[in-house]
Image (cartoon, rainbow, N blue to C red):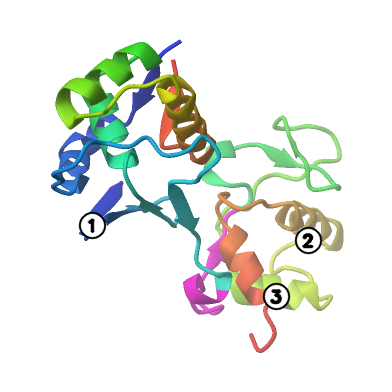
C-alpha cells in the first residue's frame, strides 16, 4: 500500500515548508493538523440573473431525464431529452413558484426541476440553484 | 488547480475546483513534499522525513504518521495507490 500526492503540486509544496531549526514532530495520533474551510454559499453566489444550470450536467451530456429527475439512457420511453441550453437562474426561480420553464411542457418542466432538486454539491448548477433559494434573492 | 501561501507557521492551500481552503501545519507540508516526489509506503515516508526533515523516530512514529495520512486521505490531499 502506497500513498501518493498530486505531482502538479511539487513546486508548491516545497515552498510551503517553513524554515525550522528544531526536529520535525508528527503530532499526536488524535490531533488534527489540517483545518479545511469552505465558504458559506452566501459568499460564493453570483447574480441570480446570470447564473445558469445545465440539465443535465456536462459530465452526463446526452442523458435523458425521467419524471423523477433521474438520468436515464437516451430515448428511454417517457423520459425527456436534455435541455438544449443551460437553464437561466431566473427561469428556475420562477419554476419554483409554479411557472413552467420556458419552451417546455408542464411534465418536462417538472422533470427538469426534479433533476435540479437532486443536485449535490460539486455538480454543475448546484451553487446556482442553492443561491436562488436564499431569502432576498 | 491549487494555490499555496505561506502564513508563518501555517500554510494555506486553496483548492480552486472544490472552493476549499486547507490550513495546514507541521508535519503536513513535509509529508506532502515527500509524496509529491514519488509515492511511498509508510516506512519509506518515515525514512524520508528522518533524512530530509529531521524527524525523530520513536515507537509512536508509525501510528502518528498513519493518523496524519488518514486525515489527509479523508480530505483528498493524498490517496492510496
| Distance between the alpha carbons at the discs numbered 1 and 2 | 46 Å
* In the image, residue A37 above or below residue A33: below
Q: In the rendering, at what x and y percent does residue A16 appear? A: 21, 47
In this orientation, which residue lies closer to the viewer: B10 or B77? B10
Judge left or right: residue A80 versus residue A134. right
Going by the picture, which residue comes out furthest to the front?
B58
What residue is at 50 percent from the left and 37 percent from the top?
Answer: B71
Answer yes or no: do the residues labelled 3 and 1 have beta carbons within 8 Å?
A: no
| Same subunit, tags 1 and 2 | no
**How would you rate the neighbour count of disc 2 (Cα within 10 Å): few for under 14, some for 14-19, many for 20 or more?**
many
* Residue B3 image point, x, y percent: 26, 53
What residue do we see at 16% from left, 46% from top?
A: A20
Q: Which residues are magenta?
A: A42-54
Tell me how far mark 3 sits from mark 1, CA to CA.
34 Å
**Quick one: A126 or A64, which is closer to the camera?**
A126
Mark 1 lies on a secondary structure that is strand
Pick the front one: A52 or B43 = B43
How busy is the neighbourhood of tag 3: few (under 14 within 10 Å), some, or many (20 plus)? few
| CA distance for labels 3 and 2 | 18 Å
Q: Is residue A119 magenta?
A: no
Which class describes the residues within 10 Å of circle 1: few (<14), some (14-19), or many (20+)?
some
Of residues A46 and A98, the one drawn nearer to the viewer in this rendering:
A46
Q: Is residue A87 visible?
A: no
Which residue in the structure is indicated by mark 3? Answer: A133
Label 1: chain? B
| Residue tagged 2 | A109
Kindly identify which numbered label has been placed on residue B5: 1
Amino acid at each position: 500500500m502506497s500513498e501518493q500526492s498530486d505531482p502538479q503540486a511539487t513546486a508548491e509544496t516545497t515552498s510551503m515548508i517553513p524554515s525550522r531549526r528544531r526536529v520535525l514532530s508528527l503530532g499526536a495520533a488524535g490531533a488534527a493538523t489540517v483545518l479545511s474551510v469552505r465558504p458559506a454559499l452566501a459568499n460564493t453566489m453570483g447574480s441570480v440573473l446570470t447564473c445558469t444550470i445545465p440539465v443535465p450536467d456536462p459530465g452526463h451530456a446526452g442523458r435523458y431525464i425521467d419524471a423523477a429527475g433521474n438520468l436515464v439512457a437516451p430515448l428511454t420511453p417517457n423520459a425527456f431529452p436534455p435541455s438544449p441550453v443551460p437553464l437561466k437562474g431566473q427561469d428556475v426561480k420562477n419554476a419554483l413558484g409554479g411557472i413552467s420553464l420556458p419552451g417546455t411542457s408542464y411534465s418536462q418542466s417538472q422533470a427538469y426541476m426534479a433533476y435540479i432538486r437532486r443536485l449535490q454539491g460539486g455538480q454543475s448548477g448546484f451553487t446556482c440553484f442553492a443561491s436562488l433559494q436564499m431569502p432576498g434573492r | 488547480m491549487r494555490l499555496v501561501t505561506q502564513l508563518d507557521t501555517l500554510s494555506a492551500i486553496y483548492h480552486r475546483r472544490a472552493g476549499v481552503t486547507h490550513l495546514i501545519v507541521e508535519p503536513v507540508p513535509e509529508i506532502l513534499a515527500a509524496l509529491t516526489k514519488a509515492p511511498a509506503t509508510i516506512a519509506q515516508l518515515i525514512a524520508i522525513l528522518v533524512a530530509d526533515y529531521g524527524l525523530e523516530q520513536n515507537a509512536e512514529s508509525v501510528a502518528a504518521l498513519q493518523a496524519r495520512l488518514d486525515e489527509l486521505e479523508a480530505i483528498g490531499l493524498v490517496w492510496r495507490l
